[in-house]
Structures are given as structure tokens and as C-alpha cells.
Image (spheres, rainbow, N blue to C red):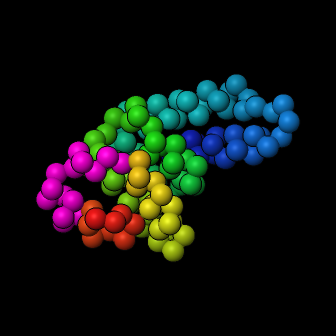
Amino acid sequence: CAAFDECMSLEKKLAGEESCQLPASKNELKEYALEYLRDSPLTTLLAGGTPFLNYDSISAIICDQDMNVDEYTMFHILRSWVVQDEGRNLKAGEELASHIDFAHIKADHLINVVKKCKFVDA
């Protein structure tokens, strides 16, 4: 998680500079880290990895269509990031929740878990 976040941060910094791109080795590292997160979200993101992510990184993960998780697990990934610092991440959580298709989450999970969080209007 931290390697992906560092690459995303560097990419953002370089985006503002004229004719600067993420070096090939950093881009390969970013892609490798993202692929690893896609394949192993339960042992990376949900095993304490989300505190290492900034907004751009969690946004890239939540919006990633190739992430190997269902919508309920994606909600848990977002929730674990939001609850680490509710004062700072609550508004971002509201925005990022719009990328989760709650229609694919079981009704009892919506009532007992999603509805109780502070960043999703249920």
C-alpha cells in the first residue's frame, strides 16, 4: 500500500511540471503495486494498509474496475480508510462512496453496516 501511495504522490507532483513524467521504474513499481493490491486486497488493504493511502491513492483503488473484490468488500476498504481520521476523511468518503454500487450489497448488510456509517446516505 505504501509503495503504491508513494508512486501516486510522485506522479501528482510531476504532473504539474512541464514535460515531466513518472520515471519508467516508478511507473512499473506503481503498476506492480496496484496489481498486487488487486490480487490480494484482503491481505493488504483490509489488513491495515489503508492508513498509508492518501486521497488520490484510495480514489484510484475505489474507482479501479479490476479490483478483485465485491462491492461490500470495496465498502469495507473505503470505510477502513475513512474511520482512521473521520474529521479529515469523512467528506472524501462521501464522494468516493458514489463509486460503489450499493445495489449489489445484501439488504441486511445495508441495514446493519452501511446505514450506520457516517459517510453514506442510506
x 58%, y 49%: residue: 56
Q: Residue furthest left?
A: 108
Please provide percent x and percent y for residue 83.
42, 67
Answer whether residue 107 is magenta in the image.
yes
x 24%, y 48%: residue: 103
The answer, for residue 63, to whether it is visible in the render is yes
Q: Quadrant of residue 82?
A: bottom left
Q: Main secondary structure of the magenta part?
A: helix
Please provide percent x and percent y for residue 62.
44, 46
* Magenta stretch, residue numbers: 100-113
Answer whether residue 106 is magenta in the image.
yes
The answer, for residue 46, to whether it is visible in the render is no
x 34%, y 66%: residue: 121
The answer to whether residue 95 is left or right of residue 113 is right
**Residue closest to the eye, 109 or 8:** 109
Q: Residue furthest bottom?
A: 87
x 21%, y 59%: residue: 110
Please provide percent x and percent y for residue 32.
53, 29
**Residue closest to the eye, 29 or 55:** 55
Please provide percent x and percent y for residue 102.
28, 51
Residue 15's place in the image compared with 111, above or below, is: above
